[in-house]
Image (tube, grey):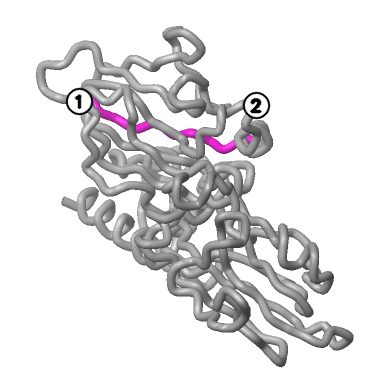
Amino acid sequence: MFKQSLLCAFCASMALSAMALEQPLIETPVNLDNGETGWYPGLCIDKTNFTSAQPGTVFTFEYTINSSSEGHSFTLCTNYSNTKMPGFEGTAGEKEMNLNVSEDGVYNYTITEEAIALLKDNGAINYDGSVRICGEGVTITKAYLTVSDEESLVTCPYDMTNNWWPGCEFGRGVITSAEVGWRIKMDYEILPGVDDAAFAITTNYGKTDVPGYAGSVVDGTRTNQPITESGSYTLTITQEAIDKLPSSDFNGWDGSIRIIGQGFTISKLVLVRSKGEASAINEVIDPGNDGTVEYFNLQGQKVTNPSNGIYIKRQGSHVQKVVVR
């Protein structure tokens, strides 16, 4: 009972620890002062950052006014700057797409299911791979998504009974906008009576392994990973994946990462926005008091000198929750 209660308390603490994080989408300010380049191509952001986001995610950009310019306005658009993003508040200009501004400010745009559907419709956006901030007389100083430290990528449970196509999809922006060391974690359950369950994590329309994933059975240009019992798989995001996935030469214009396979159900699929140098404590094991004392915070990160907080103390096989003052 002690072990079960401690584990439940620890898991509850982990659930409460989710924090709002800023996921940056540009590295340096972008000046839209030149009317020609400001209105096109403008500031281009890979659309998969939006299509891989959950509805309700907020996209924020901060801007300053260029005092030397006569006009100051911008629009949030796609289709090579011809289609206004659903819900954007611009009403000025020839196409009634622009938002006129007169002072430095911040614009918050909530990503909706309608916006995601538009960006996934290549016919509607004329195969434009970017969401664009276009305009004149302003400088975009910062652009970011507000996200949580652990974010669900799909609605689960997700049926993988026989789903070699199209598979379980999420936008490549999950990886291309990540930091090295962040993780994609999949929990799965084998279906009853199945003895040939397997999966692969791919791009290029299911043909090419995502860098960092390594299966064991070669199948054309990818490798599959057989699984014999329910469990979990963690894909650690690498610099190679971040560098390669934006390239159409590598991904064949496929904007999705796909988990494909058969014989199981995905019970959880999340992006963990933290690096995995320190392992989280996943279970409480039988008491024992041998070994070096180690402390971990409630995110599972090892702490050298704990102070003023709640920690998990591990000494050998003895694990307990403690308060340090």
* Dot 1 amino acid type: Thr
Image point (74%, 59%), residue name: 27
Query: Upstream in the sequence, badge 2 or badge 1?
Result: 1
Please indicate whether residue 203 sits to the left or right of residue 135 in the image.
left
Provide residue 252's location: percent of width, then percent of height. 56, 27
Please name the residue shown 58% across and 62% down the image: 82
Mark 2 vs mark 1: give the one in front. 2
- Name the residue: 52% across, 73% down: 308
* Within-10-Å neighbours for mark 1: few <14, some 14–19, many 20+: some
**Residue 175, can we see it?**
yes
Q: Residue at x 36, y 53 (%)?
A: 320
* Residue under numbered circle 1: 161
Whether residue 278 is visible, yes or no, is no
Q: Which residues are magenta?
A: 230-238
Residue 269 in the magenta stretch? The answer is no
Q: Secondary structure at mark 2?
A: helix
Q: Is residue 33 left or right of residue 59?
A: right
In the image, residue 60 sits, relative to residue 183, either above or below, namely below
- How far apart are labels 2 and 1 at the CA level? 31 Å
Q: Count neighbours of disc 2 (C-alpha within 10 A) and say few if under 14, some if 14 to 19, many if 20 or more.
A: few
Tell me, for residue 249, which label it has, or none.
2
Q: Is residue 110 above or below residue 321?
A: below
> Mark 2 belongs to which amino acid?
Asp
Q: Is residue 291 left or right of residue 42?
A: left
Q: Is residue 44 left or right of residue 319?
A: right
Q: Is residue 40 above or below residue 274?
A: below
Picture coordinates of residue 28 (x, y %)?
A: 78, 63
